[in-house]
Image (cartoon, rainbow, N blue to C red):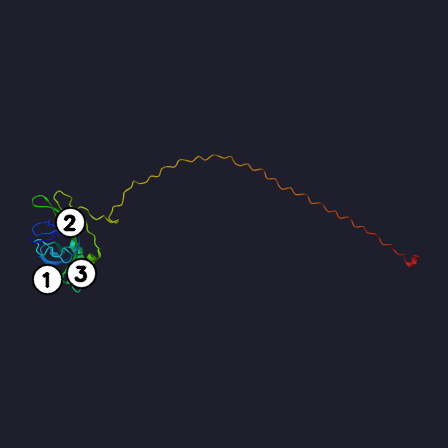
Amino acid sequence: MPNIDLSNVQESKGGSGSYTLEPGAYVMTIIDYEIQNARQYVRLRFDVAEGPRKGTYANAQWPISDVMSWKDAAKPMLKQKLRVLTESNPGWDAYDAFTNDRWGEFLGKVVGAVVRTRLYTKKDGTDGEGCEIYQLCTIEQVASGDFVVPGPKDDRKGGQQGDAAPNPPTAAAMPAPQYPQYQPQPQPQQYQPQMPPQQYPQQMPPQYPQPQQYQQPAPQYQQPAMEPVPWEQ
């Protein structure tokens, strides 16, 4: 028996050639596609292109996949996926290849993918655990860590449907809290003591001293002595 080290190898949980990736972001390469014109979508199948999990789905019966739908409700997501495919493969236009049915050009192209855990019910009624692509992103986002991994998606029968641990809603999405309408309480009437009107002393007209009357003495005149005229001598 060969002497091999399995300490860094993750066990297969999906069976039938399907392998489960840990939640996170990976650089993926497109290895296959399936067109469903009647249902208006194409399914892209991927394999891990870089890192220790490279080649995980090389021989898998059911590789991890993602759908690009051109239904009206899905067109915003389709536009985002074509954009990140184009940005991750310089010199190639994913939108041009998509609209002109050049599907073979998608093979071998790389793109980032955010992977999350998926809980489901197996055919025998027991719980199973797998993984799925939550969102495609650019390979630059994978390298820089510019991504968010959501909580597990619970698709088990009788279990909580959807994300078991969803991302917290943004402030804009949270409903405004409802508070009872404020009713102001009447204020008690404050006692105002009645003060008697203030008595002020009667104002008396000012008393000024009467001006002294100045009496000027009558002038005293003396009649000058008359000299005798010559004929009276």
Q: Secondary structure at mark 2?
A: strand
- Camera-nearest label, 1 or 2: 2
Dividing the picture into quadrants, the one containing residue 32 is: bottom left
- Percent across and percent down for residue 104 are 10, 62
Callout 3 environment at 10 Å: few (<14), some (14 to 19), or many (20+)? many
Crowding at dot 2, Cα within 10 Å, few <14 / some 14-19 / many 20+, comes out as many
The CA span between labels 3 and 1 is: 17 Å
What type is the residue that disc 3 sits on?
Ser
Q: Nearer the viewer, residue 206 or 53?
A: 53
Looking at the image, residue 10 lies above or below residue 185: below
For image coordinates 15% across by 60% down, the residue present is: 110
Does dot 3 land on a helix, a strand or a loop? helix
Could you tell me which quadrant the C terminus lies in? bottom right
Question: Can you tell which mark lies on residue 225?
Answer: none
Marks 3/2: CA distance?
A: 25 Å
Residue reaching furthest to the left: 1
Q: To which residue does mark 1 refer?
A: 104
Q: What amino acid is labelled 1 in the image? A: Gly
Q: Which mark is residue 117?
A: 2
Which kind of residue does numbered mark 2 sit on?
Thr
Q: Indicate the secondary structure of the residue bearing disc 1.
A: helix
User: Can you name the residue that lies furthest to the right here?
Assistant: 233
Whether the residues at callouts 3 and 2 have beta carbons within 8 Å, the answer is: no
Q: Are marks 1 and 2 in contact (CB under 8 Å)?
A: no
> Badge 3 is on which residue?
88
- The residue that appears at 15% across and 49% down in the rendered structure is 117
Rendered location of residue 129, percent (x, y): 12, 47
